[in-house]
Every structure is written in C-alpha cells, then in structure tokens.
Image (tube, grey):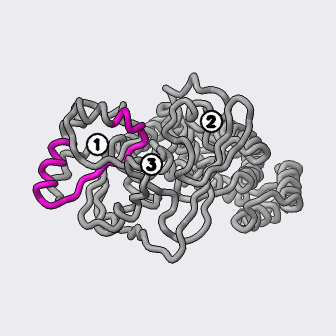
Amino acid sequence: MPWISILVALASAVGIYFLPDYHWWFLAILLLNLLFSLVFSKRYSPGALTICRLLVGALFIFSSFTKGVDPLGTKYKMLDYLSAYHMTWLNNLAMVLAVLMILAEFIVGFCLITKMLPRLAVLGATLLMLFFTFTTLFDALYNMVPDCGCFGTAIKMSNWQTFYKNLVIDTLLIPLIMNNKLLENKLGKGVQWLIAILFALAFLGFELYNYRHLPVVDFMDWKVGKQMSASSNEETKIYLTYKNKATGEKQEFLSPNYPWNDSVWMSEWEFVQQRMEGGTKFLGFSALDEDDNDVTDLILDTENLLMFTSHDLAKVTEKEWAKVKEITEEAGSRGYYVVWVVANEPEYVEQLREQYDFLYEVYYADALEIKPIVRSNPGLIWLDNGLVKDKWSSTDFKKVLKVL
C-alpha cells in the first residue's frame, strides 16, 4: 500500500506542471494521498522509507542550490515577503535571513540523503515544511507574493503549484516522521556532526562566493551568450499591477506609464505582479531617456555597449565610483559606448553628475527590471547588438579592462 502513495505522489508532481491554477479535484487527490500516507505510515518498508528519504533530501538539495547560486535574488524575494507580512522592521536582516534559510535547506537535504544525524534532519525538514506549507497556502489563497521563489529563478511556479508541490513533499515526509527511530547511521555522533558541519561550511562558502561575485550558474534571462533581440513584428506590452499598502486597492499600469519615479507614490504602493501581451521585444525590460523616449531598441541594437546598472545609486560606494570612472574613460577610448540604466529619479542623478563629474548617458527603468540584469549594485553588462558578451559584479570591476 505505501508504494501506491509514493507512486501517486510522483504522478502528482508531474501533474503540477500542467495545473498552475486552483483545481479542487487535484487538491482533493493530494490531501487524500497525504492522509493515506499518515494512516499507513507504519506499514512503510525500509525500501519505501529509503525512497521517501532520498526524494525529500534531493528536493531540499535542489531547492538550496537554485537559491544558493543566487542569494541576492533570494534576498529580494525575502524583502517581498517581509513587506507582504508587514515585517519591514526586519529588512536590514533580509540578506542574513536568506543565507541562513538556504543553508538550513541544504543541511537538511544533505543529512537526509547521507543519513547523517537522521532524526535531527527529519525534525529540521518537518519544521521547514510546516513553515513553507502554511506560507504557500496563504500565498495561494491571497496572492501575498506572486512568486515564492522556492526554486530561485530556475523554475517559475504559480502560488497554487507551489502549494501543491509542498503537499507532495509533506506526503513523502510523513512516513519519515512516523518512523524516524528506524533511521540509523552506524557512524558515531561526533563523526556525523563533523561531516555535517564541514559540508555546511563548504555550502556557506558557495553562497558567499555567489553573493560577492555573480551566480556560477545563471538562470536569469540576461545570461552570457544569450541574444536579447529588440526586433519584433508586434510590440510587447508590459502590464504592472501595484497594490496600495493602506487600502489594499490594486491598479494595473501599462509600463512605463506609471509613477515609478515618484518616491512618495512608490512608498505607498507595492508591486504585485507583471503580465505581458504582444510580441517578443524583450521580457520584462523597458528603458527610457530623460525625455521619456523608449531607448530599449537603442540599447539592444548597439555594438559594443557597456551598460552599468543600479537599482539604487545611493548604495554605490566612493571606491566603486572611482572604478566606474576608470572603466568608462578607458573603454571609451577603445570605442565602447557606455551608458547607465538606473531606477533613481533624474534629479538625484543630476546631483551625482556634479559630485562625481561623469558625462555618460543615463537611462531609466524600474528597479524590478534592473535587478535581474546583473546581480550586483552596481553591475556591468557588455552587449553587442543585443548579444550578452559578459557580465561583472562590482567586486570584479578590476577584471573588466583585462577582458575588453
């Protein structure tokens, strides 16, 4: 009987891909299978328990990798959740919380797969899944955050798909909870702890490397080697939905025709979701000049263009400005066209022009559209007629002139 539950769980996992919205019958199947798993949990054979342990562990490992490769993206998602649940007082800790959450997922997954500290691993998985399941239930019901980011930017899932996925994991986890005394490791506790700590430190180093530099595996649209075409027979229309934080009122705007450069308005409204209609101009990116002319085609159709990006120029340090100036002057002399794409207001940009004496072109875009381009603030991307040639974080600006 337990094997039937496992097979239904696996079939459901495949079915989730085809069911992005609420379907009462599918939810009923998942809940009945979860109940079945609970009722017959004591009948699970060692082989069935091993399959459950490996599947749950592998899912935690995969989830931690897709987020750990892009910890800054996970921080942005954490900020979305803190805003949605009115916990913005924790915003300054968002990066730390993101890193620790990813690390916890990795440790749980690693320990489940290797049977290191198995009972502690099952306890950790239980606590994480309780948190994830109830959070994604609220997301599914109330659309608190449009995309949970449970697999980073590697796999996009609707809120209902994410909740379905968590029910499948819960179904596989329940037998491990009910039979955790059967999970044993012949190694001594001290050795198990040592191995777990060493692997945790290694994964933490992996996270920090990706944070300081760029993701070693880029799941985003602006990956090196991708052709970002500006050409299309039909212009893409990007619609953004924002919600008033005080009243809950939602408004949909045709980008870029919304007050993104009004700091007061932006502080009172929060982003909810984005949808697109029309051609393939480019997914989720539109830049304007100071006169509100669309310069997206210019950016994507220019040879040897170096584009600095920043979703918040106020966070750019003096040292980074000095490096930017060095790169700009040298690259300009080598025939490269240098521009900035920022999310700050034009008035603030003018102040910086005077302070740092820079003369390059500045274009404007929404912070949500800038963040996926380069996971760094500031960042730099090299485009050649829309082809992404290379990208650098601010940490690696010193390497730019060696490549150009």
Q: Indicate the secondary structure of the residue bearing disc 2.
A: strand
Q: Tell whether label 2 touches label 1 (CB within 8 Å).
A: no
Which region is colored magenta? 324-349
Q: Residue furthest bottom?
A: 233
Is residue 288 one of those drawn in magenta?
no
Is residue 326 one of those drawn in magenta?
yes
> What is the CA distance from the residue labelled 1 to the residue labelled 3?
20 Å
In terms of image quadrants, where is residue 130? Answer: top right
Q: Indicate the secondary structure of the residue bearing disc 1.
A: helix
Can the viewer see residue 385 in this picture? yes
Q: Position of residue 119 (x, y in %)?
A: 65, 38
**Disc 3 designates what residue?**
365
Amino acid under disc 3: Ala
Classify 10 Å Cα crowding around label 1: few (below 14), some (14-19), many (20 and above).
many
Classify 10 Å Cα crowding around label 3: few (below 14), some (14-19), many (20 and above).
many
- Tell which tag, 1 or 2, sits nearer the viewer: 2
Mark number displayed over residue 269: 2
| Sequence-earlier tag: 1 or 2 | 2
**Disc 1 designates what residue?**
394
| Up-down relation of residue 21 to residue 308 (above or below) | below
Seen in the image, is 285 located left or right of residue 175?
left
Please name the residue shown 46% across and 56% down the image: 286
| Sequence-earlier tag: 1 or 3 | 3
| Sequence-earlier tag: 2 or 3 | 2
Q: Position of residue 219 (x, y in %)?
A: 47, 59
- Tell which tag, 1 or 3, sits nearer the viewer: 3
Q: Position of residue 128 (x, y in %)?
A: 66, 39
Please name the residue shown 37% across and 34% down the image: 347
Please name the residue shown 19% across and 36% down the image: 357
Amino acid under disc 2: Trp
In front of the other: 110 or 166: 166
Q: Position of residue 135 (x, y in %)?
A: 71, 40
